[in-house]
Amino acid sequence: MRCPSCSEDDDKVLESRAVRGGAAIRRRRVCNRCGHRFTTYEEVLRDSLMVVKRDGRLEEFSRAKLENGIQRSCLKLPISRQKVASVVDDIIEELENRYDLEIPAQAIGDLAMEELLKLDEVAYVRYASIYRHFENLEQFVKEAHLLRKAPDAAAAETVAASAAAAGTPPAPRKVPAP
Ligand SMILES: [Zn+2]
């Protein structure tokens, strides 16, 4: 690595440390010529990952886009940016395990919802209401039940209330009392 101070291409690595849950490696280096110390980051390039949209078009995968979506769902919740970044790392790792270079758009949303469900119910409901287009509130509550495996009326009310609080558009009709 070329020294940013004297441009000599001769340095020694002092320390290597995995960061962001092993998604990147941080190296502390010292120039053998001038003694200048500098830091480099090494991470896997994900540029080649493509997303297959619902209409079949291909779009370059964007980590930032996924992270922004998760971050927005976690707004004002006690979830650190670091935690959000590690959730995104988990999702990407899982996508890379399951798919080669082309990822169906739906799979990203599904995995994000799975991870958020483990993390925080409110974040999950928000993500679902923004990124998944449920036909109506009933369908959403039903799906939430299937995921949580807790099909009781109390949970239905909680989920519906959370959805309303998270700014879900009003349902076309009221959920009938069970
Ligand atoms: Zn130097």
Image: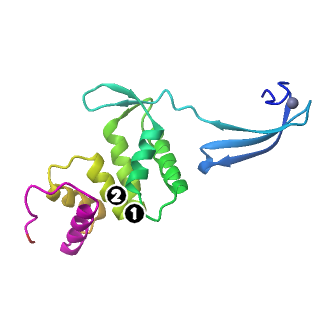
The relative height of residue 144 versus residue 21 in the rendered view (above or below) is below
Span highlighted in magenta in the image: 152-176
Can you tell which mark lies on residue 74?
A: none
Numbered badge on residue 124:
2
Q: Is residue 39 left or right of residue 23?
A: right
Q: Nearer the viewer, residue 100 or 87?
A: 87
Q: Are marks 1 and 2 in contact (CB under 8 Å)?
A: yes
The residue at the point 23 percent across, 62 percent down is 164
Picture coordinates of residue 131 (x, y %)? 29, 46
Three-letter amino acid code at disc 2? Tyr
Quarter of the image with the C terminus in it: bottom left
Marks 1/2: CA–CA distance: 6 Å
Q: Residue at x 25, y 58 (%)?
A: 167
Residue beneath the point at 28% across and 49% down: 130
Instruction: Describe residue 149's horizontal placement relative to residue 62 as left or right.
Output: left
Find disc 1 in the rendering and name its residue: 120
In front here: 79 or 112? 79
Element type at mark 1: loop
Residue 38 colored in magenta in the image: no
Return the x and y of residue 77 as percentages of the image width and height: 43, 63
Whether residue 171 is in magenta: the answer is yes
Query: Where ligand 1 lies, by quadrant?
Result: top right
Q: Nearer the viewer, residue 114 or 66?
A: 66
Q: Is residue 42 left or right of residue 32?
A: left
Q: Amino acid at mark 1?
A: Asp
Residue 23: quadrant of the picture: top right
Quarter of the picture holding the N terminus: top right
